């Protein structure tokens, strides 16, 4: 009888610990560093949309979304300067934001290109600037780099001022 009681107490204790851990995970708010980002090969339709937005170059990074929100594409370059709506052109690298969509809605996009990108590491982030009626939503970032297969990164933004780190691009 004592042995059965000990097994039951141990089982109950283990269940309580697991429930507490589960509850703590559900209560943690998403932050820019723990947002899930999936990486895929873009399908033909998405790639066609990305190619239709803005200019092309040896490196082209396109942000696509459909909600009525102002999402902003930011890319920190190897020289330390960032291209975004605040700094749309870098004459030293040739990088330029040529499409800046501030209203959102179906088939929205932003685009940054380089005709001849400098070697190094580029850091991509997407920021939720402001809502224009919707409360965030999913987005895709398509990276087209000469000599490589296009990559698509998917994630979502849920509240204004939120930032999602997408990944790095290495230019050789």
Image (cartoon, helix red, strand yellow):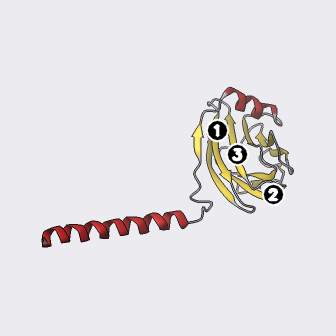
Query: Which quadrant of the structure image shows residue 111?
Result: top right
Q: Earlier in the sequence, mark 3 or mark 2?
A: 2
Look at mark 1 in the image and give the residue it sits on: 152
Classify mark 3: helix, strand or loop. Answer: strand
**Quadrant that contains the C terminus:** top right
Q: Earlier in the sequence, mark 3 or mark 1?
A: 3
Residue 139 badge: 3
Residue at 52%, 63% in the rendered image: 26
Look at mark 2 in the image and give the residue it sits on: 131
Residue 47 badge: none
Residue 129: x and y, percent?
Answer: 79, 58
Is there CB contact under 8 Å for labels 3 and 2? Answer: no
Residue 146: x and y, percent?
Answer: 68, 31
Q: CA distance from mark 2 to mark 1?
A: 24 Å
Classify mark 1: helix, strand or loop. Answer: strand
Residue 8: x and y, percent?
Answer: 24, 68
Crowding at label 3, few (<14), some or many (≥20) Cα neighbours within 10 Å? some
Residue 49 in the figure: left or right of residue 10:
right
Classify mark 2: helix, strand or loop. Answer: strand
Q: CA distance from mark 3 to mark 2?
A: 14 Å
Q: Residue furthest front?
A: 1
Does any portion of residue 124 appear in the rendered image?
A: no
């Amino acid at each position: 009888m004592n042995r059965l009681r000990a097994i039951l107490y141990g089982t109950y204790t283990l269940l309580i610990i697991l429930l507490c851990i589960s509850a703590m995970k559900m209560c943690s708010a998403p932050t820019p560093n723990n947002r899930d980002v999936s990486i895929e090969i873009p399908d033909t339709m998405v790639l066609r949309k990305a190619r239709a937005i803005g200019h092309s170059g040896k490196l082209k990074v396109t942000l696509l979304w459909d909600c009525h929100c102002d999402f902003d594409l930011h890319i920190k370059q190897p020289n330390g300067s960032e291209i975004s709506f605040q700094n749309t052109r870098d004459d030293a690298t040739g990088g330029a934001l040529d499409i800046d969509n501030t209203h959102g809605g179906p088939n929205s996009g932003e685009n940054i290109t380089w005709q001849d990108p400098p070697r190094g590491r580029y850091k991509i982030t997407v920021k939720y600037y402001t809502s224009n009626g919707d409360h965030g939503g999913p987005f895709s970032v398509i990276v087209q780099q000469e000599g490589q297969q296009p990559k698509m990164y998917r994630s979502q933004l849920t509240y204004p001022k939120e930032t999602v780190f997408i990944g790095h691009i290495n230019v050789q």
